[in-house]
Image (tube, rainbow, N blue to C red):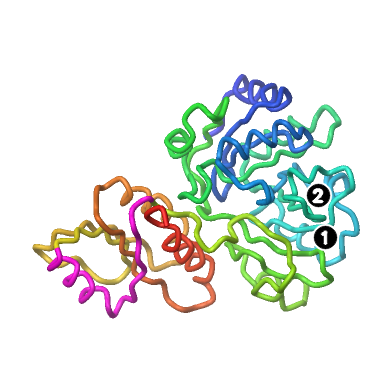
């Protein structure tokens, strides 16, 4: 789904005038502002209710823009760009001196990404056409800490008229946020897992990345213990315990919304059920929409069958654990 020419023209005009524009990426919808305009960037924080020390990712149209925003870029970072851009990978790099601390959360690093979505890329290409820095700062287009939006309707539900415009590019294809890799400290460190795994990174660089942030590593989006959260309370329960848990909840009169992979619903249960794929990529594509659906269903508790404890499920498990931690307004 590609917006009309007039929509792209209006979106670029709004961004250049300091307004907020929501747009699709392959991961989730972003709430964008001109990353070189401090006042515009501040509007993102106000619209989302986002803490000022929580840095933003700057989206650019290609790796030819990296040197405008970053310095001291290591060789392995260029290798990762060549392999995975455009795509769901954000690189944390030493920032150029001019880059505003409003964007970086007061840190000496900046997160850069080239999104792998045709609408986002066309918007970025047009926005950079006037010869300026051409970066669009864009966190997820939702209220801070809540379920990330994967359709334009989700953005409208979350933000209402706080975005001057929403570019509708259809549903996001990946469905969870990008992998974030810190490249500012001499070796790759994964600060947020995502669609691009540690094995993918190592295959390109020959360096086994650390999987946890070391002390003093940069703050990044989605790193809080409570994030991506529904307003309804949520629990993760292992598959082998799921039916016993649900029976106990039913006896207490608790109506659950279950997002499961393996256990079939039992006849007569008052709970709602939603089955997602056993494939981690397909599960990631659907999980935020499923959480949002259950959040609107009027259940007392959202119960998610815990994913398998395997490397390919690390990113999904990370999102679910944080969602449970922030659920119910916790």
Secondary structure beneath label 2? helix
Q: Which residue is mark 2?
A: 63
Image quadrant where one finds the C terminus? bottom left
Query: Is 246 within the magenta?
Result: yes
94 versus 38 height, above or below: below
Q: Residue furthest left?
A: 268
Marks 1 and 2 close (CB-CB < 8 Å): yes
Q: Which residue is mark 1?
A: 78
Q: Which residues are magenta?
A: 231-252
Closer to the chain start, of discs 1 and 2, is: 2
Q: Residue at x 37, y 54 (%)?
A: 328
* Quadrant of the rendered image containing residue 156: top left
Horizontal and vertical percent for residue 112? Answer: 74, 51
Horizontal and vertical percent for residue 324? Answer: 41, 62
Horizontal and vertical percent for residue 62? Answer: 77, 46
Query: Is 86 within the magenta?
Result: no
Q: Residue at x 80, y 58 (%)?
A: 93
Secondary structure beneath label 1? helix
- In the image: residue 154, left or right of residue 260: right
């Amino acid at each position: 789904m590609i917006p009309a020419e007039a929509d792209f023209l209006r979106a670029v005009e709004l961004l250049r005038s300091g307004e907020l524009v929501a747009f699709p990426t392959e991961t989730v919808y972003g709430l964008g502002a001109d990353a070189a305009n401090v006042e515009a960037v501040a509007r993102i924080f106000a619209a989302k209710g986002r803490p000022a020390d929580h840095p933003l990712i700057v989206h650019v149209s290609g790796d030819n823009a990296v040197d405008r925003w970053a310095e001291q870029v290591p060789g392995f970072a260029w290798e990762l760009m060549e392999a995975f851009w455009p795509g769901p990978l954000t690189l944390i790099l030493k920032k150029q001196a001019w880059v505003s601390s409003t964007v970086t959360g007061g840190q000496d690093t900046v997160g850069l990404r080239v999104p792998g979505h045709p609408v986002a890329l066309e918007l970025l290409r047009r926005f950079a056409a006037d010869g300026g820095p051409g970066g669009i700062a864009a966190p997820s287009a939702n209220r801070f800490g809540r379920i990330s939006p994967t359709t334009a309707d989700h953005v409208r539900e979350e933000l209402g008229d706080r975005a001057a415009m929403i570019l509708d590019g259809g549903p996001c294809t990946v469905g969870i946020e990008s992998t974030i890799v810190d490249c500012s400290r001499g070796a790759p460190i994964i600060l947020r897992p995502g669609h691009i795994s540690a094995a993918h990174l190592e295959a390109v660089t020959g360096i086994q990345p650390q999987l946890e942030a070391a002390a003093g590593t940069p703050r990044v989006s989605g790193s809080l213990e409570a994030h991506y959260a529904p307003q309804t309370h949520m629990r993760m329960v292992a598959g082998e315990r799921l039916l016993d848990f649900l029976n106990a909840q039913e006896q207490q009169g608790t109506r659950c919304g279950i997002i499961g992979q393996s256990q079939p619903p039992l006849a007569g249960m008052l709970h709602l059920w939603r089955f997602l794929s056993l494939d981690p990529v397909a599960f990631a594509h659907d999980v935020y929409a499923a959480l949002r659906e259950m959040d609107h269903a009027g259940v007392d508790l959202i119960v998610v069958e815990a994913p398998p404890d395997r490397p390919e499920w690390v990113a999904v498990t990370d999102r679910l654990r944080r969602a449970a931690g922030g659920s119910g307004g916790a």
